[in-house]
Image: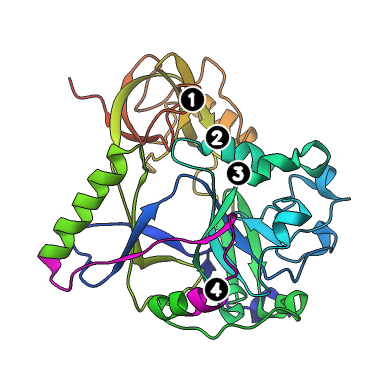
Amino acid sequence: RTFAEINMKRREFLQLAHVLKNKHNVAGALMSEKLDGMRAFWDGGGSRGLPVRDVPWANVDKQDRFLCEQSSTGLWSRYGHPIFAPDWWLDKLPNFCLDGELYIGRKLFQQTMSTARTLPGNRIDSNWEQIKYMIFDTPPLTQVFKSGEIRDTNFHKIITEDMAYVLKGVRAVSPRGFESQLIFLRQFLPQSENLILHKQEKLPLAEATARLRMYDYLKEVTAGDGEGVIIRDSNNFWEPIRSHQMLKVKTVEDAEAKVIGYTSGVIGLTGKVHGKIGALVVEAFGVKFELSGLTDEEREFGNADSKSWALANPGERAPTWAISKHFPLGSIVTFQYRELTNDGIPKEARYYRKHIQ
């Protein structure tokens, strides 16, 4: 089929959560801890053994030189990258699709990511003994291959129902509401020390009482160095979008940083940031990192020479003579972040506002 024949509605690779706001109703929803791990999709083993580059949804555009000779394991990251778990670990997984998180424990995000991202030639199989696959849901194939376009800075792909041929031997699971999917998983998920159905708690049916319990649980989780809480409507059907029926609740910190540079915006699919500032390069806590989250107006360079350079050099660090219209070098901005990594780098850092004196 041609692109014109495909419904080009934007989609994600997996179902993602919106941030909880006052407009959302949480009464009667299911609540679980938001795990600090690596999101992972198991395709039921349908692609296992195929060359990675032959799997139609694989995101290998920037990694082909490393992955062209690798075989798929059937396990994929949120951005469609193959995850090379050892065979003994994969053999415990069922013949139907799973959505969950690779997880070692609280405050062990970097250790989890290091293990999960290692290629087979460098992999230490015993490290995978610590990796638990915490299962949230079982995505129906009709939703996994719902036609649409993934448009993400980390993942560009056209997904169509035709891709389902790769998983022709995978057990089809009927689309059901989230609570019904949990009943299916309790019955058919083969439990082991590495494969665990993530614990869910049903919130009270009264909104005020449900909110109080949710925030009490958030305090419990964060007091023990947990990341936050996920709330899902009990009738939520899994689909590859950022859903208002799946919500995340996290505590955030804020701090100030000094602007020390800029990057130029990439061309991307829309071209909205081409010729503008892609991110601020800042320094805080003794480390340097980038901040995204600027508005279109805040991305403007301050003169024609800076803009011309950005148009000709997308995605590059700007030269020292480049001028920002709103953030001169040395200015102070406020950013928000969740926590510091072991290396002292703010995690999930985003620009919040100009520093208020």
Instruction: State yes or no: discs 3 and 4 in contact (Cβ < 8 Å).
Output: no
Q: Nearer the viewer, mark 3 or mark 4?
A: 3
Q: Who comes first in sequence, dot 1 or dot 2? A: 2
Q: Is residue 161 above or below residue 157?
A: below
Q: Who comes first in sequence, dot 1 or dot 4? A: 4
Q: Is residue 200 above or below residue 238?
A: above
Instruction: State yes or no: discs 1 and 2 in contact (Cβ < 8 Å).
Output: yes
Question: Can residue 22 be seen?
Answer: no
Crowding near the residue tagged with mark 4, few <14, some 14–19, many ≥20 C-alpha atoms within 10 Å: many
On the image, which quarter does residue 76 sit in?
bottom right
Crowding near the residue tagged with mark 3, few <14, some 14–19, many ≥20 C-alpha atoms within 10 Å: some
- Measured in 3D between alpha carbons, the distance from the residue under mark 1 to the one under mark 4, in whole angstroms, is 34 Å
The disc labelled 2 sits on which kind of residue? Gln
Tell whether position 307 is magenta.
no
Q: Could you say where residue 37 lies in the image, as x and y percent from the top left?
A: 51, 46
Q: Nearer the viewer, residue 220 or 38?
A: 220
- Measured in 3D between alpha carbons, the distance from the residue under mark 4 to the one under mark 2, in whole angstroms, is 27 Å
Taking the image as shown, residue 346 lies to the left or right of residue 70, namely: left
Q: Who comes first in sequence, dot 3 or dot 4? A: 3
Q: Who comes first in sequence, dot 4 or dot 2? A: 2
Residue appearing at x 72%, y 51% in the figure: 85
Residue appearing at x 60%, y 76% in the figure: 147
Instruction: State yes or no: discs 1 and 3 in contact (Cβ < 8 Å).
Output: no
Where does the magenta region start and end?
A: 184-208
Q: Nearer the viewer, mark 1 or mark 3?
A: 3
